[in-house]
Amino acid sequence: MKPRSPTENAFFMVTVGLLAWAIPGAGHFLIGERRRAIIIFVTIALTFATGLYVGSIGVIDPVNARPWYIAQIMASPLVGVLANVTRSGQYAVYGRAADVGQIYTSIAGMLNLLCILSAVYMAYQGRGEVIGTEEDEHA
């Protein structure tokens, strides 16, 4: 595989980062780190789902819990879709369940932020290559 130009390399790293944010683990999958991508996806999805299960969808509150929401949105832009559903206020949740749910969903977001940075850095280093290249086909 021929080396990428600086512009192509920058575009590739941005693509890896955006994919890693959209679907946890997708950035690692794009650079060929399949096992790592599956582990990342399962871990972040289960952590986020546990937070929703414990605290209900009401823990995603972009209005009254803005700092928590900023951490939660790092898990995926789909959190923004859930936020639009909860803006009506009919999914109010109070007490310890809300706190625990917010913590779990926010931890999932922060963990995904670390994984995004990992995927972009690995793409920058050239540790992984794009799936479907000639080298992958001969292996």
Image (cartoon, helix red, strand yellow):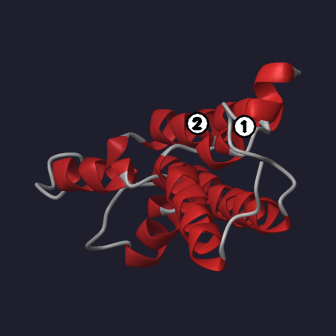
Q: Which mark is residue 5?
A: none
Residue 109 in the image: x percent, y percent?
Answer: 58, 58
* Residue 2, image quadrant: bottom right
Give how far across and how far down residue 91 sits, in percent: 23, 46
Number of marks: 2
Of pointers 1 and 2, the one earlier in the residue sequence: 1
For the C terminus, the quadrant is top right
Residue placed under numbered mark 1 in the picture: 37
Q: Is residue 49 above or below residue 58?
A: above
Secondary structure under badge 2? Answer: helix
Specify whether 11 is left or right of 60.
right
Quadrant of res 116: bottom right
The amino acid marked with disc number 1 is Ala
SS category of the residue bearing label 1: helix
Picture coordinates of residue 51, whole percent (x, y): 54, 43
Looking at this view, is 81 or 54 the one in front? Answer: 81
Question: Residue at left 25%, top 49%?
Answer: 81
Q: Which is in the foreground here, disc 1 or disc 2?
A: 1
**Residue 45: which numbered mark, if any?**
2
Q: Is residue 101 left or right of residue 40?
A: left
